[in-house]
Image (cartoon, rainbow, N blue to C red):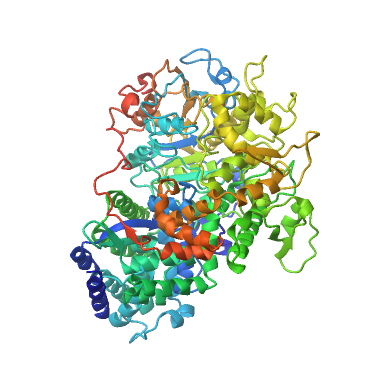
Amino acid sequence: MKLDRRFLLRGMFQGSAATMMVPFLDCFLDSKGQALAATGQKLPTRFNTFFFGCGLTKSLWVPKTAGKDYEMTVQLKPLEAYRNKLNVFSGLRIPFDDNPNYQHWSGVAAAATGISPSKQGQFDSKTIDQQVADVISRGARYKSVAAAASGNAKESYSSLGGLNTLPPETSPLSLYTRLFGPGFQDPSSPNWKPDPSIMVQQSVLSVVAEDRKRAMMHLGAADKARMDQYFTSVREVETQMATQLQRPELTAKVEIPAAPAGDMIVNNALPNIRKNVPLMSRLGALALATDQTRVFNLSISEPGSQIFIPGDSLGYHQSTHEEPIDPILGYQPRVAQYNVHSMELFAMMLKELDGVQEGDGTLLDHSLVFAYTDQSFAKIHAVDGLPILVAGLASGRMKGGYHIAGDNSTVSRVGLTAMKAMGVGVDSWGMNSMETKSPFGELLA
Amino acid sequence: MRTKFVLGIAAIVACGTWIGAAALEASGSQVVGMRRLTEHEYRNSIADILGKDIVVQGTFEPGIRIGGLTAASTAVLSITPAGFESYSKMADTIATQATNEEHRKRLVSCQPKSAKAPDDACAAEFLGHYGLRLFRRPLTAEELRSRVSLARTMAKSSGDFYAGLRYGLATLLQSPEFLFRKEIAVPVDGKAYALDPYSRATRLSYLMWDTTPDAELLKSAEIGELNTPAGLEKQVDRLMASPRLESGMRAFFSDILMLSTFDNVSKDGIFYPKWAGPMGASAAEETLRTTIALALHENGDMRDLMVTRKTQINRMLASIYGVPFSFKGEWTPYEFGPETGRTGILTQISMLAMFSHPGRSSPTKRGVALNEILLCEPTPTPPNNVDFSEVNDTNGPRKTVRERLMAHANDKTCASCHNAVDPLGLSLEGFDTIGGRREKENGETIDVSATIQGKSFSGAEGLGKFLYNNPKYPACIARKLYSYANGLNSEDVDSSAFKQGQDAFQKSGYRLRALLKGLVTSPQFFNTSAPVQEASAEHVKTASP
């Protein structure tokens, strides 16, 4: 996608954000986001997901002891700085029920929905971020925002169910433009005022919505559901507009950087992903801090990660299948290296969230980050023992610092725990063998 | 009965607006298909309706490959909130351009009484005209009324007649009636249904030109011409005679050859520094140019696509092919010498690079892709617990990929698929992961012999001849083209559905035009069955509780 930069800049100058001309990259790399005292209102609790492909290496990531004060492991080491705001879950089970083990998919869908998927590539319900967004997003501009750090528009694991995934932004520039391009007004600006053009657009949308009855006529069941989804989307954009007419309640004083001069290279080469993840995470954090959205989803790869380190002719996914297990070490050394990179990328996201001060803590303190993957042992497409990490303290509703040894609990217990911590009123989560009513109660404050 | 219905429509159209909803109910019509416009279809439609100088800027929701075609997903995907947001913004910027001072002279045919005040008659003319073009059918009275009313309100509040048109047009551009191609069918006898004239026009146009029906095609729908064999043939011949057939067939080949997914292919710059940014786009373009030149410009035998040494290259591609590029212009026709071992699209950079790893070729990936793309034989996913270590250990005694892959043959489960897949790919091992020629791998001379279904051949040229002579290849093109036209999963289509097209294809010596005409003039092409009414297995369950 090509963006007209002049168009972008014009938008920026019209908005108050143009007052801040911090060079994009400098700001992203150096700025800590100056903190100001919150205005006193209750901070919303935000939800994030972090998706990484191909799992971790069991002998290198699972802590030896359960509970608090576990000894840090080799593969979790990059997350050391956040251990008090982090919970790690091992030994979780994913029963397939009557479905096959869809390679690089069953684990993704089970973690994100608590349901063993009935088809490859398809979620059998809304994913957890959308279930949370249904409850917490009222009042934010966007119900949710997704970004794919490798630039592939198909790498979103945020879904309304079925085949419809919510498209991600595929470069830092496109993410920037969606969040802070035309239509964005800095809520901290003294000149903030409702944009009258929004009211005009509302009239346009109401004409579109009026066609609903006729549009739904004479459709078969499947097309009726698709048409219904279209009008649900219309309603959501209507809500978005209504929200934009209200000045957002500021939770942090952050600087919105100026538009980037050019875009980054986005592909599967690890060095590029390492550049893009901090940028995208930073934009996501700013979006959360300025209430542009309360749900941010970041993926670094697809399941069966196509990430590669230049010079490695196989790349991550192929290495998981083809690299021999070293007889002395007992694991695949190159795969283990890729695993660590995944955790380093996760740490980059947490750094951005933890770097924004708001109220009595940081954005990470007022968030939950659900990090998950597709396989526990990618070499053989195993899913039992799927690594899941949940960071953030959910505004005090979640305790941190634990290693939960799952003891064959179903993976859906993590989802239920996260839902509870987010204040979503559910008693059970997941379906069939994974339906559970037991959150990890020791984590809930 | 059909004639009566068509006359009925014509009469209503003549009255100015189409009371579509009432007509639908009266005739027992059903919406039998709903295809989300692809990015190309959307862009081409806007260019045709409003002009090529209207800038379309925004993101489109991606499709998914189903049965080897992204087109099949357009019949099952919907529009998500983020997708609609983007469509809504695009609608506004397009409508703003279309009604600005620069464009209104050309696009607004009537003169308002005052440029500063509402004028319902002129607004209705404008919105009715573009409504017909965008919805590919006349607007209903209600659809038109609500838009004229919006235009009036907006013109009044802004003191600008054209602002009213802008917002009215924007509602059309983000309507599901534009963003989805609704296929409406009417009952022809007790059980069977056939597409109504406007849906016929739409299906033909998007298939053959990759764009919205032009005024003549809509007219021919309106007067019922498309419902007669002679009228249909006349329009099909017209569409096929136009150079725009190229756009339609480019879209088709881009889909079946997976060229649209090439954007996400990365190569390792350390091993292959020649592979730079736009290489993927150039490689895809080469394959499309080769295919279109053969299929349409030369009206050639489609089997030659497997063996021709003719291609078109640019400077970037020339560097990988090792061809000195001393030509004027960006692209130039080129014919490889017989000594190069190049054979049709099989050895073009696109096909070789797309189905390889970032730093290494993959006979299995290439074999799986060729089986699915050219022979319509998808490979099942491998079993979950497979030890690939043997394949990878380049330091062991097995120097070449072939030797390493042969380890699979010892395992029955693996062998059942790999024996069908690997030979195709192994014969292409004379070409590296970005499509360059090579003789050796890790110091060993590469063996490019292959045996499949009892037939032995050697190298890419042997593979080309094997495919040229394989009747499954042209049958697969016929199957995919039919599925593409109808938005179906090609694996679920019964071969009787495209038999007439396939027969014409064979009889003509495998000319693409014969296949296309045979398909769309087949009496079955517009026949359909009523859609399933009750919730199917596709229905999305809601998570508990």
Identify the residue at the far top of this view. Answer: A65
Q: How many marks?
A: 0
Q: Name which quarter of the figure residue B299 lies in.
A: bottom right
The image shows residue B146 at horizontal and vertical percentages of 26, 69
The residue sitting at 49% across, 42% down in the picture is A285
The image shows residue B404 at horizontal and vertical percentages of 68, 29
The image shows residue B159 at horizontal and vertical percentages of 34, 78
Q: Nearer the viewer, residue A242 or B253?
A: B253
Quarter of the C terminus of chain A within the rendering: top left
Q: Nearer the viewer, residue A240 or B211?
A: B211
Q: From this viewpoint, is residue A13 visible? A: no
Quarter of the N terminus of chain A within the rendering: bottom right
Tell whether A257 sits left or right of B390.
left
Does residue A30 sit above or below B197 in this rendering? above
Does residue A35 sit above or below A65 in this rendering? below
Q: From this viewpoint, is residue A374 visible? A: yes
The residue sitting at 55% across, 61% down in the picture is B250
Tell whether A12 sits left or right of B527.
right
The residue sitting at 37% across, 43% down in the picture is A160
Q: Nearer the viewer, residue A50 or B439?
A: B439
The image shows residue A105 at horizontal and vertical percentages of 46, 34
